[in-house]
């Protein structure tokens, strides 16, 4: 991650052990021990990349990396099945004229019937916006709380809690729809994002993250059924293996990587064309699941989007 602003968490997904937490750019805390020249501190303070901020303790909109969680909640609540399809036309959609000028947009105009796996492979915002609406506000909020939203992560280092919204509820159908693909007011810390994928490797169990050596493996949440998480895990493999997948660049020899990309737009309104974008990738090796990485790189717009993050993260598995 050298040279980029962002954060990452690497964990052992079968035990919950935290292997690394990264906030970059950083500074040497030893410089503060013997005293730092005011000019040196001012340089850190005024650096536009904000090295004094501990990014892994903060929260961010997770973008499309939340879609596997939305999918799991939809399957577990019986809202839909893995085989069920939606036929969506065009690259923009709104539930009704009541939404005014607001529309959910997607990159790929796949006008043919699309099942959940294909929607994850193509990272279809409209599919998951519609899925969140299908689930309904109450069931979706309950499902997200089942993954640990709204609670402090049980971890020895203090982290800002992930949130469904500023109130813990959905104020409108638009907010509910946007949350289905990781926008709206949804926020996650990077470690919670990493451990929210552990159910896909542990028959539905979301593990407690361990900071200290010797801590025992414990289940924090039983987030979803083993049937559901098994289905989602297979889909995450296809996000990498399918040539049309957003993470196909991670389909390397010697590993069976699975995961999900994401791009979170940071703008004041839908009309804002100058908003920044954060890129994400959550990835693990199905064949040898001894490490799962969740990585966020800031300001990826015009730099390859989430593809930039895929290329960085995949190096850890080669």
Image: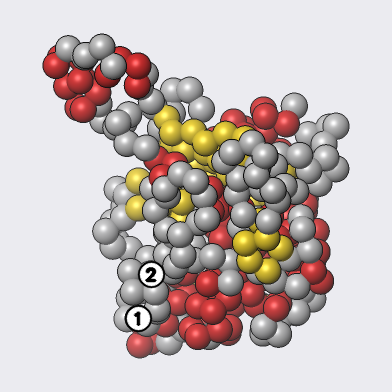
The quadrant of the image that shows the C terminus is top right
The extreme left residue here reads 38
Q: Is residue 47 visible?
A: yes
Q: Secondary structure beneath disc 2?
A: loop
Label 1–label 2 contact, CB within 8 A: yes
At horizontal 58% and vertical 66% (from top left) the residue drawn is 147
Q: Position of residue 185 (x, y in %)?
A: 37, 65
At horizontal 39% and vertical 74% (from top left) the residue drawn is 168
Which numbered disc, 1 or 2, marks the residue that appears first in the sequence? Answer: 2
Q: Is residue 221 left or right of residue 193?
A: right
Residue behind mark 2: 165
Decide: is 162 above or below 243.
below
Depth-wise, is mark 1 or mark 2 nearer the camera? 2
Q: Position of residue 280 (x, y in %)?
A: 53, 45
At horizontal 49% and vertical 62% (from top left) the residue drawn is 182
Residue behind mark 1: 171
Residue 270, by quadrant, is bottom left
At horizontal 45% and vertical 59% (from top left) the residue drawn is 152
Q: Position of residue 72 (x, y in %)?
A: 67, 70
Label 1, residues with CA under 10 Å away: few <14, some 14-19, many ≥20:
few
Along the line of sight, the residue nearer the viewer: 249 or 244: 249
């Amino acid at each position: 991650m050298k040279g980029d602003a962002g954060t990452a968490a690497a964990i052992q997904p079968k035990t919950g052990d935290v292997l690394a937490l990264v906030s970059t750019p950083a500074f040497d805390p030893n410089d503060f021990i013997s005293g730092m020249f005011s000019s040196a501190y001012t340089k850190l303070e005024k650096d536009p990349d904000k090295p004094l901020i501990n990014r892994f303790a903060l929260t961010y909109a997770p973008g499309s990396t939340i879609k596997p969680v939305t999918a799991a909640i939809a399957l577990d609540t019986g809202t839909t099945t893995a085989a069920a399809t939606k036929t969506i036309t065009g690259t923009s959609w709104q539930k009704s004229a009541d939404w005014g000028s607001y529309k959910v947009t997607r990159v790929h105009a796949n006008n043919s019937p699309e099942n959940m796996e294909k929607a994850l492979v193509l990272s279809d915002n409209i599919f998951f916006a519609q899925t969140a609406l299908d689930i309904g506000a109450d069931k979706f909020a309950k499902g997200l709380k089942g993954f640990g939203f709204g609670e402090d992560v049980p971890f020895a280092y203090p982290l800002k809690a992930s949130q469904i919204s500023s109130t813990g509820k959905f104020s409108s159908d638009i907010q509910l729809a946007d949350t289905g693909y990781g926008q709206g007011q949804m926020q996650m810390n990077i470690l919670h994002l990493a451990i929210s994928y552990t159910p896909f490797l542990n028959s539905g169990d979301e593990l407690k993250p361990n900071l200290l050596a010797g801590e025992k493996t414990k289940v924090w949440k039983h987030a979803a059924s083993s049937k559901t998480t098994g289905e989602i895990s297979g889909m995450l493999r296809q996000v990498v293996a399918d040539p049309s997948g957003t993470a196909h660049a991670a389909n390397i020899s010697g590993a069976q990587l699975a995961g999900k990309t994401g791009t979170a737009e940071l703008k004041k309104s839908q009309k804002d064309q100058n908003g920044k974008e954060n890129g994400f990738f959550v990835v693990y090796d199905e064949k040898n699941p001894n490490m799962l990485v969740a990585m966020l790189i800031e300001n990826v717009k015009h730099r390859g989007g989430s593809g930039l993050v895929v290329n960085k993260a995949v190096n850890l598995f080669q």
